[in-house]
Image (tube, rainbow, N blue to C red):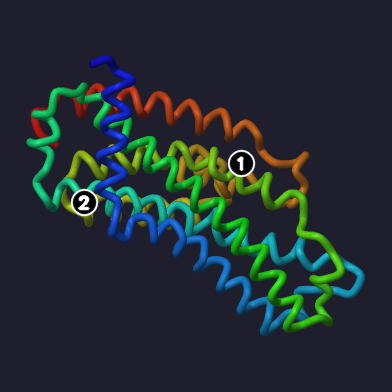
Amino acid sequence: MNAATDLINCLGMERLKLKGTLVIWLAIFAPGFVVVVAFVAGYADGERFYQPGVNPWNNFCEHLLAGWSLFIFPLYISLLSALYAALEHQNRAWGYLYSLPVLKSSIYLSKLLVLTALIVLSHTALFVLGFCAGSLIGLLKPAFGFQNYAMSAFMPVACLHLFVCGLGMIVIQLLISLWYPSFIIPAGFGLFATLAGAIARSFQVSHFSPYLWPFVFLNNTLGVNNWNYAILGWSVCTYLLGAYISMFFLGRRSRV
């Protein structure tokens, strides 16, 4: 077997493992939670947020992106990666996986690619559910004017870029989750890193934390020309380097 065949076979195994688990549902629930909070706030206090003659979608999308990038997205990756790795830890399946006639690197890469695909799903859900929620506010509260404007063009672009900004977090959290069998350690680490970044976000040094990169990328503005695009390169480099380091260390353990 070659490396590509091994990877395809491992991806097939991962797909079967995910059936009937909460992992995929979490990918929908996390962005759904942000959308519900923004919907409730917009529906109840829309008079404060949406001004006559101004596109209400701008304010609504700003609430979605701020809540998602600063708190929910990092916590979601931490919980998702820990829950995903727990599928193997709880069943003591690592010995079996490493006994299969496939490259150990393929086992790790298949998990990294599946986790990355789930993050793509979550950002797609954030955009779709956000559009549905805003449209529903327009139906229930016509005075806010949602039905008179189109959804802001920056929203799908922001979702795509925030996904890229999260690549660094993905590779870090997956390594911690695979290395430690305890669910508490990766979940707790992600929680601590998220809270520390949120508290210290006004300090320049905190911007080097991958857990703050999605928020730093937006740069407190809706203007796409003013977003911090350098973060995208940092995140991609962390993803690739982290994947190589993870394969190096995990591949040298008989069991994880």
- Residue at label 2? 86
> How far apart are the two marked residues, 1 and 2, measured between alpha carbons?
29 Å
Density class for disc 2 (Cα within 10 Å; few <14, some 14-19, many ≥20) is some
Which secondary structure lies at badge 1?
helix
Identified by mark 1, the residue type is: His
Along the line of sight, which residue is nearer the eye, 97 or 249? 97
Residue 117 pos. (x, y %): 44, 42
Given the current orientation, which residue lies at the most extreme top position? Answer: 2
Q: Quadrant of the C terminus?
A: top left
Asked if residue 199 shows in the view, the reply is no
Q: Is residue 88 visible?
A: yes
Front-lying residue, 13 or 83 = 13
Q: Quadrant of residue 168?
A: top left
| Residue 191 in the figure: left or right of residue 107 | right
Q: Residue at x 76, y 64 (%)?
A: 57
Residue at horizontal 45%, vertical 64%? 29
Left or right: residue 65 versus residue 163 is right
Residue marked by disc 1: 161
Q: Earlier in the sequence, mark 1 or mark 2?
A: 2
The 10 Å Cα crowd at callout 1, few under 14, some 14 to 19, many 20 or more, is: some
- Which secondary structure lies at badge 2? helix
Please state, as top left, top right, bottom left or bottom right, where the N terminus lies in the image: top left
Is 71 positioned to the left or the right of 64 in the image? Answer: left
Is residue 60 depicted above or below 104 in this figure?
Answer: below
Three-letter amino acid code at disc 2? Ala
Residue 247, compared with residue 18, is above or below; it is: above
Q: Relative to 41, is 31 on the left or the right?
A: left
Q: Quadrant of residue 179?
A: top left
